[in-house]
Image (spheres, rainbow, N blue to C red):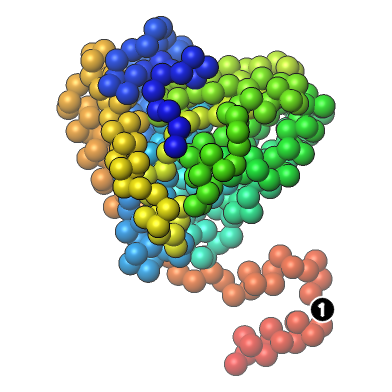
Amino acid sequence: MRDTGPSDDMVRHVAPDGTAVGDVDVGLDEGDLRELLRLMVRARRLDRECMALQRQGELTVYPPFEGQEAAQVGSAFALGPSDFVFPSFRELAAAIARGVDVVEYLQYHRGTWHGGAYDPIAARFAPICVPVATQIVHAVGWALGAKLDGIGACALAYFGDGATSEGDFHEAANMAAVFRVPVVLFCQNNGWAISVPLSEQTAVPIARRAGGYGFPGVRVDGNDVLAVYAVTRAAVERARAGEGPTLIEAITYRIGPHTTADDATRYRAPEEVERWRRLDPIERYRRFLLGAGIVGEEFVAACEAEAEAWVAEVRTAVTALGPPPEDEMVAFAFAEPPTTLTREWRERTDA
């Protein structure tokens, strides 16, 4: 694996033990600083519930994100209401931070609705994207349209380290650079492309690839929510100012398997996982807030209790979902259904 200690080229504001590293003023007030913790706690609790729901047959396949809460919440928190997120399949924490209806989102994993939120335009959160790296091209295309329309917004594409080995990543990066589109390319480098380690994907840090296309690349401690927020906020402001794209490489780790269909013990040593558990982003941030006097233990306990109650509500709503309407199988396929299909459908409904 890679070095997890301080790095001269990796942005960090809070050390793994919760102590400040230099100036930790990232422009957030104390209310926002507390909200970051609340969102991360909420995200982790729902992630663990989704794992349980899948094991109980209530969800199909689910991709856990435990360990990546700071990377997702910190980056999503840096966006404005008009900015647009283009996720892969592991961005439930970002969806929570963006205010997406999580019951709608989880219908994708329930198998009752394809794509996540019913209205991506209203949610400013594109459909969940399973094909590796294709959402990066979508983000660049949307960002180019936003630039041409002069709406003053940017796109943020989430992807993993494995996606940077795909042609779509390079094509999107090149197009973004040539047309100076307002986009942030956010790589959650969690060390593994399913079972392929980072060492077998690239010989240099992923952020350095940006230089080949002519735009900045930044490495950030992805388990430091304040550093992630600050780096993303700077990239968003740069994009909106017409200065083009930024590639952010957030160094983090997925504690769980690639998905619930994966057995990560076949390719990862337990010692590696335990080493990263000790770098827990939520515990790090909790210690920082307590040490700075921004929160007390009662606030932390309240966050946990609130998350528990909220997740119980989500679970009830998700498990109560019925099957999708049958006409959705064909409703979006034809502007005018052919007569053969109309006849078949009439026979089915009359039966």
Residue 72 placed where, x, y %?
Answer: 47, 35
Image quarter where the N terminus lies is: top left
Q: Which residue is mark 1?
A: 338
Residue at the left extreme, as displayed: 298
Residue nearest the observer in this picture, 131 or 196: 196
Q: Residue furthest bottom?
A: 351
Quadrant for the C terminus in the image: bottom right
Q: Secondary structure at mark 1?
A: loop
Task: Determine crowd level at label 1: few under 14, some 14-19, many 20+ residues with C-alpha closer than 10 A.
Answer: few
For residue 131, side relative to residue 301 (left or right)? right
Q: Residue at x 22, y 33 (%)?
A: 302
In the visual, does 284 lie left or right of 343? Answer: left
Q: Position of residue 321 (x, y in %)?
A: 43, 65
Residue name at image x 53 percent, y 49 percent: 196
Instruction: Note whether residue 330 is visible.
Output: yes
* Image coords of residue 133 (percent x, y): 65, 46
- Vertical relation: 327 (above or below) 116: below
Q: Quadrant of residue 45?
A: top left
Q: Identity of the amino acid at label 1? A: Pro
Instruction: State the count of labels.
Output: 1
Q: Is residue 87 visible?
A: no
**Residue at 41% of width from left, 15% of height from top?**
13
Q: Vertical placement of 159 versus 38: above or below? A: below
Rendered view: 97 above or below 309: above
Residue 341 in picture, x, y percent from top left: 75, 82
